[in-house]
Amino acid sequence: MRLFDTHAHLDFPQFNGDRNLVLSAMKEHGIFALNVGVDLPTSQASLALSASHPHIYAACGIHPHEAKSVTPDTLAALEELLQKGAVAVGECGLDFYRDLSPRDQQVWVFRAQLRLAKKLDLPVIVHERAAWPECLQVLREEGPVRAVLHAFSGDLARAQEALALGLYLGIGGPLTYPKNEPLREALRKVPPQRVLLETDCPYLPPQPFRGQRNDPLKLRHVAETLAGLWRRPLPEVAEITYANAQRFLGVQG
Ligand SMILES: [Zn+2]
C-alpha cells in the first residue's frame, strides 16, 4: 500500500533529532511526501531533501505570515528556486486569522505566486485561514490554476464552492477530530478524485496523537477515517488518493 502526504515540513527543527529515521521509515512503509517551503530558506531545504530522497518532492513558496518582508527580489529568488526541481508552488495564500503580514501585502504576494505558477506550469499549495471569500476571489481572478486548499476544514457548501473552481481539497488530521462532523459530512459527498491526503507535519496530528508531533507515518489514520466515510477498503482509498497526488503534481513513481 502506498500513501502520498501532499503537505509535510520535514525540514522543520522538530525533526532535527530523528529526521533520517522518519525518512527511512517512510520509505519502508511506501509513504511519499511533498515537502513544502514557507520562505526562501525552507524552500531551499525542501529542494535539498528532495534531491537526496527519491520519495520526497519539493514545493517552494512564501507563506502569508512571511509576506511582510517580500520584495520583487524575493520573488525573483523564488522563481530561481522553483526552476531547480520543484514540483509545486507553495505554500502561499491568505491568513487573516493571525494577520502576521498586512492584508494588502498578503494579497500581492499571493497573486505574484499564482502568476509564477502559471508561468512555470506548476500546481499551487494554498494556505487559507479566515480569508475564504478573499482567497476564492483571488483564485478566480488569477485562474485557472491547478491548486489545492491545504488543511481544508470547511463544510459541504465550502467544499462545493472550491470544487466548482476546479480546486482539490487537502485533508489531514482535522478529519479525525470529534468536533469536525461538518467536515466529515462534506467528505462523504465530494468526488474522491479531488481529495489529497496530507499531514501538515509537525502540526495537526490525528486524534489518537493530539498534543504530539505529527509525522507522515500517522497519515494512515486519516486514510482509515476516509475509508470509513467512503465505505471503501483502505488500500483502495490509499490508491485513489495516491493517484490524485501524482496527477495533481504531475509526477510519476
Ligand atoms: Zn504547512
Image: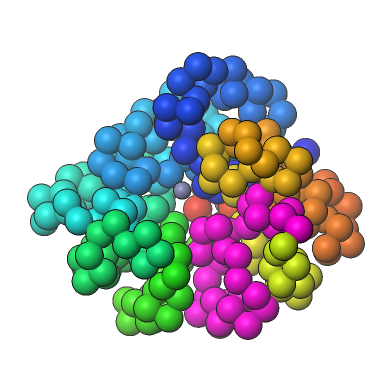
Image quarter where the C terminus lies is top right
Q: Which residues are magenta?
A: 149-178
Tell me if I can see residue 4 in this picture. yes
Relative to 118, say whether 24 is above or below. Answer: above
In the foreground, 194 or 37: 37
Relative to 91, say whether 11 is above or below. Answer: above
Residue 19: horizontal and vertical position, in percent? 51, 21
Residue 63: horizontal and vertical position, in percent? 33, 53
Name which residue lies at 33% across and 37% down.
Answer: 42
Is 14 placed left or right of 186 in the picture? Answer: left
* Quadrant housing residue 153: bottom right
Name which residue lies at 54% across and 18% down.
Answer: 18
How many marks the image carries: the answer is 0
Name which residue lies at 42% across and 32% down.
Answer: 12
Residue 128 falls inside the magenta stretch = no
* Quadrant housing residue 46: top left
Residue 103: horizontal and vertical position, in percent? 26, 69
Name which residue lies at 54% across and 42% down.
Answer: 203
Is 112 placed left or right of 240 in the picture? Answer: left
Tell me if I can see residue 121 in this picture. no
